[in-house]
Amino acid sequence: MPEKAEYKMFVIKEIISYCSYCKEIRINRAKSASAPERGTSGACCFTAASSYIKLYALLLIISAAAFILSACNPVLALNPRYSYTSFSLDLGESIPYSIEEYIDFDRLSAEDAAFVRENTEILYDGKPANEKFMAEPGDHSVTIMYCGHQYRNYQIEITDKEAPVIKVVKNIYTFMGIPPEDVDPESMFTVSDNSGKCEIKISETEVDYTKAGKYPVTAVATDASGNSSKAKAYVIVQKPKYGAVGTYVFVSIAKQHLTYFVDGKVAMDCPVVTGNAGNHNTPTGTFHLIYKSRNLVLKGSNDDGSKYASHVNYWMAFLGSSYGLHDASWRSTFGGKIYQGNGSHGCVNMPIPAAAELFGMLEPGTPILIY
């Protein structure tokens, strides 16, 4: 081993030297340091060691101070209500999304409160919470993030104990002979639920559309949590007749008159010309509006074999595509006995204004009674 061994450490422009020969620690303020000659007198080992310890302690104090300053954020205190880590809510109850709900700001200075508000975030199921979210039934989490770290996590169970609200809007009046598919039972009810999601099942198994009578229709509404409610409405099947309850068109062959009823009350009426009696009779019975269309050309053959092509503005079919209610611009008069010698080819001819009015009101499926 060399007679002299030297190790140097530079700390705040001071040089600490250690001589392995004399076992001395020396502090030199020169820009460079060299190991003392053997036997050279200088600062005592105790004094040098004491200075080194002081420097080391100073470094520890500086480091600790820096750490304390970096971690010296305001201490949060929870409102007593949120001292627990789990709680239950009914669906529809508000889940707080504001930090003021969770933290007791009365314990903070104005400066600390501003810091907390700026550096705190509420997460709902891992996503930023706001007043617009709608919690669904089930298990959820609310997390308070403070300065980028999780401060508190809550487990929330949301339960739905409220049954759907189902109301009867109307009873349906129909007629013997009207196809069941033309009756819309769902239109008889409205359903609402606090969850926004609801399934409705309607049973009309007791309805006999071929026989006059009053028949119950039952609706059951069930939400995702299994809550359910029931309601009952009625389908009233009637014999076809003028003045019956409901919404329908009634055409009287004998009176050559058309009447449109809405909820049993006359909405409009007009004289008509039906099919020529004897060879082009208008079909009688219970029908319904199949479809309606604008600006068609009706084509066919006259009794003498000649062809005809008649333009109509308003077409309302009730039997296939061959029979319908429509305007007849080629006629100047309607009603009376016209149909007994100068009737139509089977359709129901109407004045243009009346056809336009009825066209605007009729919906597919509306019963059309011709008797």
Image: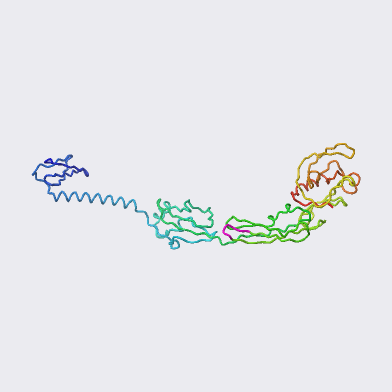
Position of residue 230 measured from the top left corner of the image (x, y, whole percent) = 65, 61
Position of residue 201 measured from the top left corner of the image (x, y, whole percent) = 65, 57
Position of residue 4 relative to residue 207, above or below, is above
Q: Nearer the viewer, residue 192 or 269?
A: 192
Quarter of the N terminus within the rendering: top left
Q: Nearer the viewer, residue 39 or 107?
A: 39
Q: Residue furthest top?
A: 306
Q: How many marks?
A: 0
Identify the residue at horizontal 87%, vertical 45% (top origin).
Answer: 280
Say left or right for 51 vs 239: left
Residue 194 lies in quadrant: bottom right
Range of magenta residues: 221-226
Q: Nearer the viewer, residue 334 or 13?
A: 334
362 is within the stretch colored magenta: no
Position of residue 335 relative to residue 208, above or below, is above
Q: From this viewpoint, is residue 253 visible?
A: yes
**What is the image's colouring?**
rainbow
Identify the residue at horizontal 25%, vertical 51% (top origin).
Answer: 60
Q: Residue furthest left?
A: 39
Say left or right for 145 vs 47: right
Position of residue 58 relative to residue 298, above or below, is below
224 is within the stretch colored magenta: yes
Identify the residue at horizontal 50%, vertical 59% (top origin).
Answer: 157
Position of residue 247 measured from the top left corner of the image (x, y, whole percent) = 76, 54
Position of residue 165 measured from the top left corner of the image (x, y, whole percent) = 62, 60
Q: From this viewpoint, is residue 349 visible?
A: no
